[in-house]
Amino acid sequence: MKKTFTINISGTVFHIEEDAYEVLQKYLVNLKNHFGSSEEGKEILTDIEARIAEIFIEKSTNVQNVVTIEMVNGAIEIMGTPEDFVEDEGETEVQAAESDETKRRRRLYRDPDHRVIGGVCGGLGAYFNMDPVILRIIFIALLFLTGGTALLAYIILWIAVPKAKNTAQRLEMRGQEATVKNIEKSIKEEVTEMKESFKKMKDSDTYAKGKRSVDAAGDVAYSGIKVILRVAVIVIGVLLIISGFLGLLGFISSMVIGHSFVQGWPMIWSPEVEVPGFFNHFVSPGTVTFGMIAVGILAGIPLLAMLFIGTKLVFRYKTNNTAIGLTMVGVWLIALVSLIVVSFSQLGNFKSQSSFTETKTISCGLCQTLTLKLGEDKYADYAKMDFEIDNVKIAVVDGEEVMLGHAKLDIEKSGNDEFVILVKKASRGKSRELAKENSENIIYRYDLQDSTVVFDPYFILGKDDKYRGQQVDITIKVPEGKAVYLSDDLVKIIHDIENVSNTWDGDMVGKTWVMKPEGLTLKEK
């Protein structure tokens, strides 16, 4: 029993005996060394391998396609070795041709190299050794004489006759043996013919005129594209200059005088920005100036970069772009890091929370119903800044800014027979002591007149107080069996009052509610 290998030759898998494999490998290496590694040599080797695969298939007598040493030697004998096909000085071309003619019979293929439609006439011409033009004339004549039957025959031949795909098949088509010598000769003739055809085309007047036309069209297109790109660059540069300049103007005016007088213009600082004094309500003294400088750098450097890039595109002057760019990026990053550090330090002012509650018992004798009203909005006619956070906003009173906040009103059951008002003031701070101090500084007033309580719409922060999440929660304690009347304007401050009927806060106003054991209940008329 001999050892076998599995190999792939020209896309076909064969099982080959060990001694046959060694001989075949040596033969193929010898051919590769002879033809070299050029594209022409690679094509010759590919066609030779395809022919060897055909020989192995023809000589195979078993299902497994096992290639023996006898099959390899037979293929080498048919194909020949490089030593065999070195040109003999005494052999003439006529003798070689006669020898080739006797080696192999012709086989019909479609000729892809001399085709007009499908290569049928070219293949027939090679098979019968005739000029394909004569056969094409015959086909055209038969087309008219047979009423179209010749066309049907041509289509059948087109489908039935295989195309000569490689050099070995093109040699078979001409009745030549597909040996190494003939394959090499055929490929070299094809390459020579192709080179000559290209040379003729290149030397023709039509090619020269076409090349000049293409070169001229290319020059015109290049010049046109160059002009268009230059105009586009200038337009972009102008837009960047205008946007950068107006953006800087709007930003500086917002920082200095409190609002941008170029607001609403396209591509620039559009919204109104109230900067002076604004941050003083939120941050500790001394940090506003530093923060404004950092913000100015963060916003100003990109706008300056727009101006720089725009002028560079328009005027095309030479500068050290790398140094300028790195400097601007470095300054911008320093400003960003500094602003982040300062911002986190200011967040510490909201770390702790504290509150205190003021309690007042309402002595109204035998009154059974307590009327709750909302006082006049004293800040309705004053200008307000377009800002609100957590129900806190800023109003400008006689040129000074005042921070206002909405109070929240709730109603609960009392533990005794008296009406009680609880006012809870809460705030945050860096410590619990500071948070308690901030909550005690909240100013909130209400007016008690017999059985009527009038609440201020807002609580007010002290002049020097900063925003620290201040809030005021009002709770009315109602004894069981007694009632409260909610006026219509109270809808602005009531907040999630629980009642038996789950009536929405906005629908509770303008009605009288009685405190019963089960909770606050709408009084029946």
Image: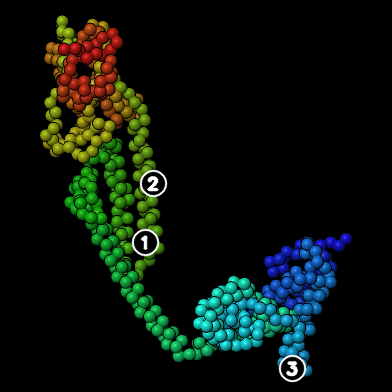
Task: Answer with mark 3 or mark 2, whichever residue precedes in sequence.
Answer: 3
Distance between the Cα atoms at labels 1 and 2? 20 Å
Dot 2: element: helix
Query: How many numbered marks have been drawn onto this rendered protein structure?
Result: 3
Residue 259 seen from this side: yes
Residue in the picture at 15% in, 5% down: 366
Dot 1: element: helix
**The quadrant where residue 432 appears:** top left
Distance between the Cα atoms at labels 3 and 2? 91 Å
> Pointer 2: what residue?
337
Residue in the picture at 40% in, 63% down: 322
- Amino acid type, label 3: Thr
**The quadrant where residue 43 appears:** bottom right
Please say if the residues under marks 3 and 2 sit with CB atoms less than 8 Å apart: no
Q: Which dot, 3 or 2, sits closer to the camera?
A: 3
In the rendered image of this protein, does residue 377 appear above or below residue 369? below
Dot 3: element: loop
Please say if the residues under marks 1 and 2 sit with CB atoms less than 8 Å apart: no
Q: Position of residue 301 (x, y in %)?
A: 32, 55
Q: Which dot, 1 or 3, sits closer to the camera?
A: 3
Instruction: Look at the image and tell me in which quarter the C terminus lies.
Output: top left
> Pointer 3: what residue?
92
Q: Position of residue 485 (x, y in %)?
A: 17, 16
Q: Position of residue 461 (x, y in %)?
A: 22, 29
Q: Give the class, few, some or many, for how many residues have Cα within 10 Å of label 1's Cα (few <14, many ≥20).
A: few
- Residue 324, label in figure: 1
